[in-house]
Amino acid sequence: MMLNLVKLKRAVLTIAILIFFEEQVCAQYNTDEKRRDFYLEICKEYAPDAFEILKSGDYKIFVKFADGTETRRELLDRLNTVVHETCHSYNFKTGFESGWGNEGYFITNGIKITTKKGSYFPSAALNEMVPKEQQEKIFRYDTYVGGEPGNSSTLEGVYAFINEFSAYYHGTKVDWEMFKYVQTFCSYTDVKCWTQDFLPNMESTLYAFYEFRLFIAWYLIYAEEHESKVYGELINNQNLKVAFTLLETLFQNLVDDYFKTREIVVKNLIAAGNKIEVGDKFLYVVNGNSKSGNGIPDDDIKYLKSLYTSRENSMLEKFRVNGVNLSNYKQFLVDVKK
């Protein structure tokens, strides 16, 4: 009787494990509607800015950026991209609704800024002033600056750079905001969950903060020297400068939050019995005499910071609006007519 009871308990345990495994691995989110519900539910709970972005448009559009995903892990891996791309749509919608030829920028929950779009020139002109070595070492340079002017990102200069700055901020932020959610199902004994999923999801886009501020500074420097009309319109575009200033502050805070959160994760992983080493380029998990590494953005950030000379910093200071913040920003805006 006792033997049969033991067998029964083992059978129940085996079934429970199989059910759990099936739930984690098999297709839980195999329709657009299920993917939509997953994203909206977790963003409503943990990421209000991302929730505002996603609910702003047709879900059939944003879930397309998660095509092929069927598990929670896969959906979380795509969340950054889903929010990033949908933010572009929200920005466009904001500008379009205020009048053709206007640009719109989503800043944070309930705050959108519309600005007139003036003159611009293709950003590939910066190839004349940015050394080839720097172009090749900056990950997003060719895509958004030096490549063929086949899209708005390379054609519309600072207006497009701030659009991308907004999208990269919100995409990265939603990954960081998933920290509390991931803690609900990921133990610190599960090293892969933290070092191969959670942290890497935001790390590849985090240093866009330094890239796009460089692009904006270089564009303004070039414009001041060669395109005086464009420069004058940009440097006097009050709403555009307010949008940039607010986003820059928020993105800088996010960069700081990432490093604080990574420190917490590493500390908890070590407390759970794991051996972790953090270098300039990789976060290593050590097992005996071997170790495996996952890339971190520290070295990229260090290099990008080295490119900020007094010239870039001075131009960015000219482009900022002193004293503006999320509480008083309306006082700094000018009306944008349709």
Image (tube, rainbow, N blue to C red):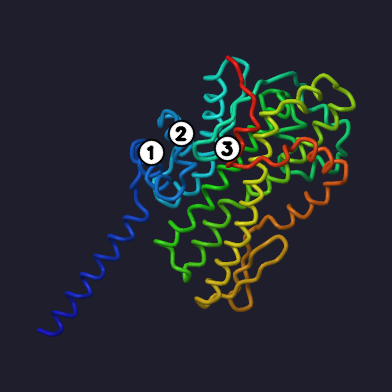
Residue 62 horizontal side relative to residue 146, left or right: left
Q: Determine contact: label 3, label 2, CB under 8 Å.
A: no
**Residue 124 drawn at (x, y percent):** 79, 28
Query: Which picture quadrant has residue 181?
Result: bottom left
Q: Amino acid at mark 3?
A: Ile
Looking at the rendered structure, the secondary structure element under dot 3 is strand
Residue at label 1? 36
Q: Which mark is residue 62?
A: 2
Mark 3 packing: few (<14 Cα in 10 Å), some, or many (20+)?
many
User: Are the two marked residues, 2 and 1, in contact with CB atoms closer than 8 angstroms?
Assistant: yes
Where residue 67 sits, quadrant-wise, is top left
Residue neighbourhood size for the residue with mark 2, other residues' Cα within 10 Å, grouped as few (<14), some (14–19), many (≥20): many
Give the residue type that dot 1 points to.
Arg
Type of amino acid under label 2: Phe
Q: Nearer the viewer, residue 126 or 21?
A: 126
Quadrant (top left/top right/bottom left/bottom right) for the C terminus: top right
Q: Which residue is mark 3?
A: 107
Q: Is 60 rendered above or below residue 180?
A: above
Sequence order check, earlier mark of 2 and 1? 1
